[in-house]
Image (spheres, rainbow, N blue to C red):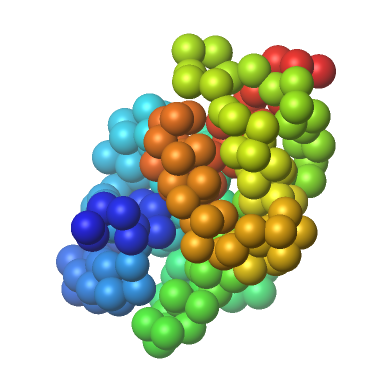
Amino acid sequence: MAEQSSRGEIFVVDDDPAVRDTLSMVLKAAGYEVICFADGAALLSVARSRTPAAILLDVHIPGKSGLDILNELQGEDYPAPIFMISGQGDIAMAVGAIKSGALDFIEKPFRGSEIVGRLDEAIGAYARRQAENASPKFSSLHFPGREPLTRREREVLEQFASGASNKEAGRTLGISPRTIEDHRANIMKKLGARNAADLIRIVMTAAQRAS
């Protein structure tokens, strides 16, 4: 049951065990799964084969700095939003992080509710932007090796990828939000998507092949 309600994985990178524990507790309470890392090397070993909904990356970590890790991931066009966090931040550092591809810069100490709110908003906006940039033709999209989507599932997928809520999608397609939810669950199962951001990535990949 917990797996169905998961809102996706968040990778937390911080060398302070107390910060990792606090963020883990707050984010799990908000419905996310959390994987913690104490340094950038540990993150990279996992991040290259697995994509979370977002990464919270501390600037000052052992070995390569958080900014070095950010540049490395962005250089590979990493398909997830990355948030930099720091207890010793300044304006120049924040500007540098944003220019290097970070979605946001969060200063310590922070409130748990603030982190969750900013993550929720940013992950949703990021997924919508990715969908808009993809501009896929859903009727002709092919997902190799995946079970074909029904016509209605493709319509629901198009609504979802355009950023519509279950309620808005239901209103557009003339079905209930609960039915939209059921269709979305089937779509994710068929396409092997772990979470909303993962689903958008699968759609974008198919759209790129089609273009």
Above or below, 6 relative to 203: below
Instruction: Please report the residue visible at 37 percent of the width from the left and 82 percent of the height from the top.
Output: 112
186 over 169 or under it: above or below: above
- Tell me which residue sits at (48%, 12%) in the image: 145
- Write the residue at 45% across / 30% down: 190
Residue 209 position by quadrant: top right
Report if residue 23 is visible in the image: no
In front: 118, or 77?
A: 118
Q: Nearer the viewer, residue 83 or 136?
A: 136
- Count of picture labels: 0
Residue 147 x/y as whole percent: 48, 20
Image coordinates of residue 176 in percent, x first then y, are 59, 63
In the rendered view, does 112 fall on the left or right side of 133? left
Q: From the top left corner, tell me how far across and down residue 57 is, in percent.
A: 43, 57
Question: Residue 184: horizontal and vertical position, in percent?
Answer: 51, 47
Residue at 44% of width from left, 75% of height from top?
Answer: 116
Q: Name the one closer to the observer, 171 or 73.
A: 171
Q: Report whether 102 appears left or right of 190.
A: right
Of residues 200 and 78, the one drawn nearer to the viewer in this rendering: 200
Q: Quadrant of the C terminus?
A: top right
